[in-house]
Amino acid sequence: RKQGYGKILIEKVSELGKLRGCTFITVSTMEWEALDFYKSLGFVVEFIRSGYSQNTRMCFLRKEL
C-alpha cells in the first residue's frame, strides 16, 4: 500500500485491455478495503451487494477504456 504498485498495475491492465479491444474493465472490493483507491483511478460503482458478515458490502466497479 501507498507505494504506487496498484496504480501502475491498473494502468498496465488498461493499456492491455485497449490493445485487445476491450471497452471497459471491472474490479470488486469490500467497501472497507480499496473503494476510494479505485474511485480515484476513475472507476465508478456499478452495483453493491449486501449480506456479508458484520453488515459489510461488496462493491463492483467499472472503468471505461
Image (tube, grey):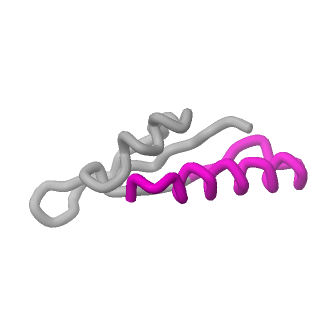
Judge from the rendering whether residue 36 lies leftward or rightward of residue 28; answer left or right.
Answer: left
User: Would you place residue 20 above or below residue 18 in this image?
Assistant: below
Q: Is residue 57 magenta?
A: no
Measuring from the top left, give residue 6's x and y in whole percent. 52, 56
Judge from the rendering whether residue 44 lies leftward or rightward of residue 13; answer left or right.
Answer: left
Measuring from the top left, give residue 55's x and y in whole percent. 13, 55
**Residue found farthest to the bottom:** 53
Asked whether 39 or 24 is in front, the reply is 39
Measuring from the top left, give residue 31's x and y in whole percent. 29, 49
Q: Quadrant of the C terminus?
A: top right
Q: Quadrant of the N terminus?
A: bottom left
The stretch of residues the image draws in magenta is 1-26
Q: For the point 83% across and 46% down, which residue is it?
A: 18
State which quadrant residue 51 falls in.
bottom left
Asked whether 52 or 20 is in front, the reply is 20
Q: For the point 81% across and 55% down, which residue is it?
A: 16
| Numbered-mark total | 0
Asked whether 44 or 1 is in front, the reply is 1
Q: For the point 62% across and 58% down, which residue is it?
A: 9
Q: Is residue 10 magenta?
A: yes
